[in-house]
Image (cartoon, grey):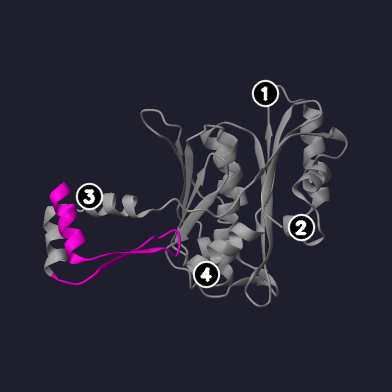
Amino acid sequence: MNDYLVRAVTADETVKLVAIRSTELVRRGAEIQHTAPNATAAFGRALTAASMMGNMQKVDDGSLTLQIRGGGPIGTITCVSDAVGNVRGCVTEPNVPLVEKYPGKLDVGATVGVAGTLTVIRDLRMKEPYIGTIELVSGEIADDITAYFAQSEQTPTACALGVLVDRDATVKVAGGYLLQLLPGAPEEVIDALEQGVARAGAVTKMLEDGLTPEDMLAQVCGSLGVLLLESTEVAYRCYCSRERVERVLISLGRAELEDIAAQGQTFPVSCQFCDAQYRFTPEEIRCLLEKI
């Protein structure tokens, strides 16, 4: 089954809703980054959140970057989403130790750490990107996304994310949802959502039970009702190309390129976001030098 996300509102149009099934894209990201179970759970949550946040921007050629630096063993998590919700990402240290809160429950907070920041960079194709940064709350990522919207964008938000890593270290299910109050939402709606979030329980349990993104929103919203607006397929997608790599190499400057060419060997460049590798011969490096 392909991954997809849905955008919706409550029946009274007081709450904006997004939910996603991200199992395949998280599997692909974990496969490319060769992540150990704890890193898979943390990285997968970040990919899932970035996909929903990128789709919510609704700027045709915009992008959103989510970067988490918590001081934990995973180092920095970087995820980039396009305006559809297709994502790519990387982690500094994929091979982190196994840490559990209790048997069978991975401790994502310990892997990410809390002595750091969460940064969101919104490229809306304007003169300068919007950059918002907050101190991490728990390192569990969903809590931190909730805090980001409250502190940096003054938008009351509830975020839930889940990645279930199977016994063979593969991703069994992954997904999440975002709920955002629109101006004027009455107190009874807030109460109903709080009860709905508690009633729905963990995202991974809902997905494991076969619930779709639409079902998850119905569970959370309950009697508030859900009006579906759009359903969009999303995937792990990298936009690297040989031309883009050439521009990066040119940006290194003449001295460094001359040094690479002088070594007389093919120079490999690997994309940090995917498993693509680009190889440049000394002659091709010299051609780049001519472009400077």
- Identify the residue shown where x is 46% and y is 59%: 90
Which of 173 and 14 lies nearest the eye of the viewer? 173
Which is more foreground, mark 3 or mark 2? Answer: 3
Q: CA distance from mark 2 to mark 4?
A: 22 Å
Q: Would you say the residues marked 4 and 1 are in contact, meaning their CB atoms lie under 8 Å apart?
A: no
**Does dot 1 land on a helix, a strand or a loop?**
loop
Q: CA distance from mark 3 to mark 2?
A: 45 Å
Q: Is residue 189 visible?
A: yes
Tag 2: amino acid: Leu
Q: CA distance from mark 3 to mark 4?
A: 30 Å
Which of 109 and 266 lies nearest the eye of the viewer? 266
Q: CA distance from mark 1 to mark 2?
A: 31 Å
Tag 3: amino acid: Ser
Q: Which mark is residue 35?
A: 4
Question: Is the residue 235 above or below the residue 163 in the image?
Answer: above
Q: CA distance from mark 4 to mark 1?
A: 41 Å
